[in-house]
């Protein structure tokens, strides 16, 4: 077949983090794009998942109709997260857009030594490349509006958190901020005053349950979507747009990311765990990444902790479909356990780590300076 319609690819659902087969040639024929010398066109996306990627062999002279069909086929593979590269990096046809051509000729993800062992970065670099390809998906005619809900009792983190929200791309954002016993703190006042986004502030004393304050803030939402945000974590500038793309492609009611990267602040150490797979249907996503349509938002329960888990549990029990997208643009900060509503000792994260680095070492998709 010459093209796989975007709605049928289901986005990157089923993406395999570790490939089990090598790169295959992608060749144009009378049947459209085909694998190697096969005359039968492409198989379904699921059959391509085990491949490390596809190397595009560019056809010669083509009609305008063939060019459109060829480009449609490539773009649909990109939307599905199939890693693509150009077999000849210095030869990309002029009918391929500059952004797409730049990704096809970027071979950095292929240069990582896979023989270094199962904990090497080859799979991570490959997935980052896959995510960049997915972002080429056509965007809605109208820019999505997102109401970001955040509660904070840590005034020293507010400016950074609000700055990260302001950097979000391809969305219009309003901030619904709950100040938890810090409304009069000078750092909190300054962060709110300097925020360049539309912002609505709800204040409550420190004795108010965390969930009750979040719900008061969320009740002011006017965006098409509601997104949960944690003040102490790090988010890449395409965090929200990646979630929206995953929601649109999957048709899920709720989307969020895998909790994959953690910065263990007291140890000045970053760990990555891969025990939670991504691009799957699930009943759990990282609480600081929940996104759903405002019309489907049930509100937060007035709990002192476990607010995110309670929302996911209740919605899943009611039949909501929850999709867990990649976690490469998100890093959770862990200090001592008493400082978090999700209380686990630092030793737990070291135990489950797949990779461990000294210092702050997020995925490249976080675009940390």
Image (cartoon, grey):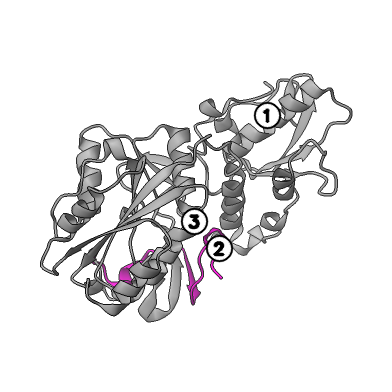
Q: Name the residue under label 1.
A: 72
Q: Which of marks 2 and 1 is nearer the N terminus?
A: 1
Please name the residue shown 20% across and 36% down the image.
317
Residue behind mark 3: 328
Residue 28 horizontal side relative to residue 293, left or right? right
Q: Is residue 3 magenta?
A: no
Q: Which of 322 and 267 is in front in this view?
A: 322
Task: Pinpoint residue 39: horizontal percent, then vertical percent.
Answer: 75, 21
* Mark 3 residue element: loop
- Report how far apart the C-alphas of labels 3 and 2 lie in the structure: 10 Å
Tags 3 and 1 touching, CB below 8 Å: no
Residue 217, image quadrant: bottom left
The part of the image, by quadrant, that contains residue 299 is top left
User: Does the segment drawn in magenta span residue 347?
Assistant: yes
Helix, strand or loop under label 2 = loop
Task: Write the residue at 62% across / 51% down.
Answer: 129
Nearer to the camera, 327 or 96? 96
In the image: residue 30, left or right of residue 264:
right
Which numbered disc, 3 or 2, marks the residue that appears first in the sequence? 3
Q: How far apart are marks 2 and 1 (CA)?
A: 29 Å
Q: Where is residue 198 in the image (x, y as percent from the top left)?
A: 37, 56
Q: Which of marks 3 and 1 is nearer the N terminus?
A: 1
Mark sitting on residue 212:
none
Residue at mark 2: 367
Q: In which quarter of the image is the N terminus?
A: top right
Tell me the CA gap for discs 3 and 1. Answer: 27 Å
Q: Provide the residue span drawn in magenta.
A: 343-369
Residue 355: where, in percent of width, then height? 48, 66
The C terminus is located in which quarter? bottom right
Instruction: Mark 3 vs mark 2: give the one in front.
Output: 2
Q: Which residue is drawn at 72% across and 24% down?
A: 69
Residue 73 located left or right of residue 12: right
């Amino acid at each position: 077949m010459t093209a796989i319609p975007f709605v049928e690819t289901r986005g990157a659902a089923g993406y395999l983090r570790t490939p089990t087969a090598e790169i295959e040639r992608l060749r144009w024929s009378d049947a459209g794009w085909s694998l190697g010398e096969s005359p039968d066109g492409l198989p379904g996306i699921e059959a391509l998942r085990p491949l490390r990627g596809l190397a595009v062999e560019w056809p010669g002279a083509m009609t305008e109709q063939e060019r459109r069909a060829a480009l449609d086929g490539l773009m649909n593979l990109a939307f599905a997260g199939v890693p693509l590269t150009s077999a000849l990096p210095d030869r990309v046809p002029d009918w391929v857009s500059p952004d797409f051509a730049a990704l096809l000729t970027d071979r950095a993800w292929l240069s990582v030594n896979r023989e270094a062992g199962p904990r090497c970065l080859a799979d991570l670099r490959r997935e980052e490349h896959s995510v960049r390809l997915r972002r080429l998906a056509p965007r809605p005619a109208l820019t999505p509006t997102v109401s970001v809900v955040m509660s904070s009792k840590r005034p020293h983190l507010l400016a950074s958190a609000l700055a990260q929200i302001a950097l979000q791309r391809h969305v219009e954002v309003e901030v619904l901020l709950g100040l938890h016993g810090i409304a009069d703190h000078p750092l909190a006042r300054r962060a709110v005053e300097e925020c360049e986004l539309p912002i609505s502030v709800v204040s409550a004393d420190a004795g108010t349950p965390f969930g009750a304050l979040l719900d008061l803030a969320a009740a002011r939402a006017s965006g098409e979507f509601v997104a949960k945000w944690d003040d102490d974590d790090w988010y890449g500038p395409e965090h929200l747009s990646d979630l929206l793309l995953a929601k649109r492609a999957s048709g899920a009611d709720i989307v969020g990311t895998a909790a994959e990267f953690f910065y263990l602040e007291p140890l000045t150490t970053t760990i990555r765990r891969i025990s939670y797979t991504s691009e799957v249907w699930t009943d759990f996503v990282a609480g600081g990444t929940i996104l759903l349509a405002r019309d489907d938002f049930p509100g937060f329960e007035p709990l002192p902790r476990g607010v995110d888990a309670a929302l996911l549990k209740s919605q899943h029990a009611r039949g909501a479909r929850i999709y867990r997208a990649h976690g490469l643009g998100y890093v959770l900060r862990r200090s001592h356990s008493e400082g978090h509503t999700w209380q686990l000792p630092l030793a737990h994260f070291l135990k489950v780590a797949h990779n461990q680095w000294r210092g702050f070492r997020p995925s490249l998709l976080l675009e940390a300076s």
